């Protein structure tokens, strides 16, 4: 049986590269479904967390959605959602990625939004404090997942004291100590 909803991409449909500042991007348009996908990844994953700041890269990924010089957190969340698009992000050991799915006619809107998040985030103090609890809840939920716990334990045992052995989310203790200065220093 053929799945007609599954996009069929040709390698020529993909556009991507690395900017002078090291930021990687991939953009693909699915002409048959009239939608596009973009992912922008920065080489700043948990592997680059400063010592004693476990989880800072992941926390930064959360905090970029909390406001920019021209948008509130609510405006960020609704900018693509109101036109049927989707915006999200993730942190891995090696990178932070912001990605979006949207109708082709909103390409400029999606690129502008992601650029705003990555360049003009303001990290409001009240939002940082709220986000600490969100991440602590996320850490607690991982403890309820046998697969996630197994992977974190494997990394800890395999990599020992190396940064790759530290959980991407950090610890409750490390997350509760983060502040705006830590985020700005990590970006630098």
Image (tube, rainbow, N blue to C red):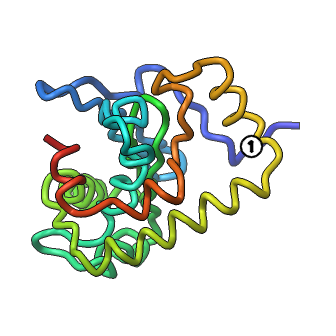
Decide which of 85, 152 is in the foreground and name it. Answer: 152
Residue furthest out toward the right = 1
Instruction: Count residues near mark 1 (Cα–Cα under 10 Å), then give few for <14, some for 14-19, many for 20+.
Output: some
Position of the C terminus, as image quadrant, is top left
- Residue drawn 30% across and 57% down? 110
Q: Is residue 111 above or below residue 68?
A: above
Q: Is residue 116 above or below residue 131?
A: above
- Residue drawn 27% across and 23% down? 17
Report which residue position mark 1 lands on.
Answer: 149
Decide which of 131, 158 is in the foreground and name it. Answer: 158
Circle count: 1
Left or right for 2, reference 54: right
Quarter location, residue 25: top left
Q: Position of residue 5 (x, y in %)?
A: 69, 48
- Residue drawn 17% across and 58% down? 181
Left or right for 61, reference 17: right
Left or right for 164, reference 65: right
């Amino acid at each position: 049986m053929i799945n007609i909803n599954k996009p069929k991409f040709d390698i020529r449909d993909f556009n991507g590269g690395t900017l002078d500042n090291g930021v990687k991007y991939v953009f693909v348009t699915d002409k048959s479904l009239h939608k596009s996908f973009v992912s922008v990844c920065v080489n700043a994953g948990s592997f680059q967390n400063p010592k004693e700041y476990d989880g800072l890269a992941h926390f930064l990924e959360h905090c970029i959605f909390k406001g920019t010089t021209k948008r509130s957190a609510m405006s960020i969340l609704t900018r693509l959602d109101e036109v049927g698009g989707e915006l999200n992000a993730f942190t891995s050991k090696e990178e932070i990625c912001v990605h979006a799915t949207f109708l082709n006619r909103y390409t400029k809107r999606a690129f502008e939004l992601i650029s705003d998040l990555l360049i003009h985030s303001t990290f409001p103090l009240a939002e940082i404090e709220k986000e600490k609890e969100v991440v602590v809840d996320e850490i607690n939920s991982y403890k309820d997942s046998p697969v996630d716990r197994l992977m974190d334990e494997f990394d800890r045992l395999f990599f020992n004291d190396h940064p790759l052995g530290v959980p991407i989310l950090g610890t409750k203790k490390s997350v509760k100590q983060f502040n705006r200065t830590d985020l700005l220093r990590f970006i630098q």
